[in-house]
Image (spheres, helix red, strand yellow):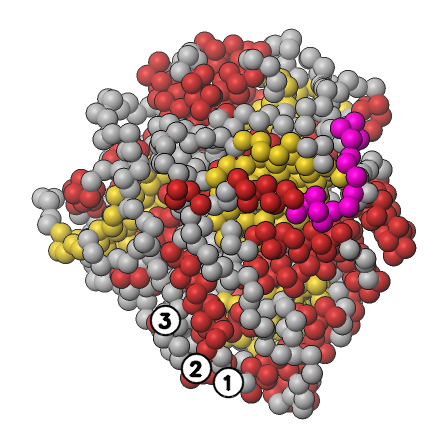
Amino acid sequence: AEMAAAVSRDDELVVKSPSDNRSYRLLRLANGLCALLIHDPEIYADGGPAPKPNEDVDMDDGDDEEEDDEDDEEDDEEYSDEDGEDDDDEEGEEDEDGSEPKRKKDKGSSEPVIKKAAAAVCVGMGSFADPPKAQGLAHFLEHMLFMGSSVFPDENEYDSYLSKHGGSSNAFTETEYTCYHFEVNREYLKGALDRFSQFFVSPLVKAEAMDREILAVDSEFNQVLQSDSCRLYQLQSHTCSQGHPLNRFTWGNKKSLSNAMGSGINLREEILQMYMSNYHGGMMKLVIIGGEPLDTLEAWTMELFSEVKAGPLLEISPKTDMPFWKSGKLYKLEAVRDVHSLFLSWTLPCLHKEYMKKPEDYLAHLLGHEGKGSLLYFLKAKGWASTLSAGVGTGGTQRSSYAYIFEMSIRLSDSGLKNLFEVITAVYQYINLLKQSEPQEWIFKELQDIGYMEFRFAEEQPPDDYVVDLAENMLFYSEKHIISGEYIYEGWEPELVKHVLSFFHPDNMRVDILSRSFDKQSQAIRCEPWFGSQYIEEDIPSSLIESWRNPVEIDGNFHLPRKNEYIPGDFSLRNASIPKSSNDDNPRCIVDEPFIKLWHKMDITFNVPRANAYFLISVKDGCSSLRNSVLTDLFANLLKDELNEVLYQAYVAKLETSLSVVGSNLELKLYGYNDKLAILLSHILAASQSFSPKIDRFEVIKEDLERAYRNTNMKPMSHSTYLRLQFLRQIFWDVNEKLKVLATLTFSDLAAFVPELLSQLHIEGLCHGNLSGDEAINISKIFQNTLSGQTLSVEARHGERVLCIPHGANFIRSVRVKNDLEENSVVEVYFPVEQDIGKDSTRLRAITDLFSNIIEEPCFDQLRTKEQLGYTVDSSPRMTYRLLAYCFRVMSSKYSPVYLQSRIDNFIDGLSALLDGLEEETFEHHKSGLIAQKLEKDPSLSYQTGDYWSQITDKRYMFDMSKLEAEELRTVGKEDVISWYNAYIRSSSPTRRRLAIHVYGCNSDIAEAAKLQEQSWTAIDDVESLKGSSQFYPSLC
């Protein structure tokens, strides 16, 4: 194909934030494809693109855990050993080392600032296009595009190229679009685009790859089989009007796809048909961010994407009115977790065209408000609910061209469940208040100010997240507003708000109840076919519906929110007066007193009026006993409950707070605009100082905590992490024991405990961002002046101690899943390396990371793509309270832990040959890719704060750790990686140590575990007695 000229280009059209120094070009190709090219001058801030080394193409990597539209729990962050696994928020989870979830790197200050390049393509077709006879086809097609193209026929060529050059990729299927994206080290953007563009030109869709990849789709579905939110979504689809696009099964699984083949459908032809009809230029939005000049990016786009077939321009226009659901029904769905959740859904017209006015967000702001006068405030006072959220979700189902679905979800207490209809009555009283009072322009103005402020001072996202967001935005916003569309509120139109509000009536409402208290004996039980979940459909009495239509009265407690005192007014930068030195300093300790130690760094990199203030508050005996640890949990939850109204107002104004129990400490974080930060902190500390629990709230919060404890470990992946930590940590209170103790605790127990808990304290904190040294010192004074506790002595502060597994030991812990219906099994094999201390520790971390970088893709390719053991396969370093280790994990719904263990062992044994056979050039690619990753600039202030904070909580204080690791890597040779493997991982090594955690799914027989004891494994059933006779490392943090 000869080079086609661009039909049009525009460098001025897209409105960008005043603080954004990137340049944007909109390009339309003759084939209809629309591209947004972004030149980021910081990508090559150290000079232009270097001449390309000759690229070889033989080494593998990939982490295309393609996520589905309803699945966002892939978070295997390097070096943070927490489980970012659970949906809903499980306060009862023990987490590991208090470090922030990190991106795949860990950086300190960096001289050569390096950023990655990235690209995304959104295709305007998704699972609504599935043929009824092959449900899940769009999602399956998305998987198949990764499996090789005519130009690059190798199945893992794309992934292996990315992996070798510091990159990664992913994709997801929505209802009306599908998105593919990658990021890669800056010099390799062209090579990655070359491989990526072929997805949209010449995919092979090989039959033999299809048979295996159906299993990957099936494993992916099995991951969510026990997820309450996914089950509810599927019930809503299942009970949708016949013939409605929502009435389908979007995930796809082996049954839906193989059955299609069984009934004579040629699945390959169906996929190619879907591809041919939809994958053309008119359906595609491309976004590329790179360091090259726009003209270069344009030339590459023309060269690679002009080959895409031409097609008419896509218009996602609002469709005809068709009712989603039968009205007047109540659906009761049996829950997997211990929860009572009420979901009220109203169907609104498609509001794509009203994105400037956002009437649905105005209503969400009021219906979801948590201040005095709000619906939640009222329901909490009654003891009926603990949380409430409202609004139109971001997913494709909630915002389709057919309708917007406005959902209110309310987490009920036992008494809220008993008074279910009274709860809904309260909702309609509040809706009636909104209908009777005119829409308020001042409220719109508040939202407008906050939106503009967020646009003006937007924190930069990682490049791959940014390109995905913009590619999605290109489908829904006009070209001018691709960046600003989600932030702007323009054109106050009270009539439009009233029009949207008119859809909030009981005849247009769907009611779903998700609960474990479900009548299993009922004759009316039905079964949702894909998940097999049980539900009952009931009629709501018409007298109730009538009373909701016209509430007789509105409770006197309801009123609109008051003016928000936390909206910032001062955006001036504290660093304006200091010279911009290229050298970015590390945090300095500016207060070092027995009671409080404070680190400070004024930001000179990101130049936004934001600040992050993090504090670790050591309390007296917070976790010294089982009883105390439960009382500490109760105290933290009651304090959050007490402060909720204030914290919520600040949250709306983008100043957020988190308060959690981490180990035996309280961790308090304030992050957002700095203007009102000190005021909020004073308020929080004053409330905790004068805290006196209230008996009615105690009962409600106790019930909540009981649920959180019961729901802990319901997911096999978090369960295995939990079991590993239980094994490793010297002090670890078992959640089932906590549950028993909680039942015995009374209000007076808590009232007596709190003054004791706060009687002795020690605070270590970090103030980072737009705060001067004086302001930071002032913050330390707020602590000293507000809290009356004495200083907690160094000896009384709890240090974490980690078990030292002896050389040559092979410990195994085998446990059944907690949820009897959970089919997935998990195997986690953990190899301790060394304690992270001493002069060699940086080199050891660097070698461990390099090993990981080399084997990550072969591991994925072998255990997932080829053997199809399960959807989740990962291998990565772990840092547990400064014990460095390496970990392999597989989750599978098909195979038993014993088999999975044998396949992991087989892969590990094969690594010897893989490392020996690694060509020097490939090794150097991995090394330079990892060095670039270590030197990569943090995308935003909060990522940098997270890195600094983990150095403080780990008491390592090595704020430029990544830079030091990058330096160290320069002298690491292939033989160093091999000798590391031979010492710590290889089965014949006398110094190797292993801990395996096996979680048995309901289809696997735990009796098989006995087989492993014949293979040199030592089964551990009583962890506490093992700890009693074991050595522990000295505490470092």
Type of residue at label 2?
Pro
Relative depth, front residue between 878 and 33: 878
Q: Is residue 2 above or below residue 316?
A: above
Between the C-alphas of marks 3 and 1, the distance is 19 Å
Q: Is residue 291 above or below residue 339?
A: above
Is label 3 in a helix, a strand or a loop?
loop
Residue 909 can be seen in this image? no
User: Is residue 191 in the magenta section?
Assistant: no
Relative depth, front residue between 112 and 565: 565
Residue linked to disc 2: 494
Q: At x 54% / y 25%, what residue is drawn?
A: 958
Q: At x 40% / y 62%, what residue is drawn?
A: 452
Instruction: Of the two numbered discs 1 and 2 on the same chain, state the one appearing first in sequence.
Output: 1
Residue linked to disc 1: 438
Q: Is residue 546 left or right of residue 447?
A: right
Q: Is residue 883 left or right of residue 710?
A: left
Q: Quadrant of residue 680?
A: bottom right
Q: What is the span of residues highlighted in magenta in the rendered image?
A: 782-796
Residue linked to disc 3: 490
Q: Is residue 157 above or below residue 327?
A: above
Q: Position of residue 622 (x, y in %)?
A: 79, 40
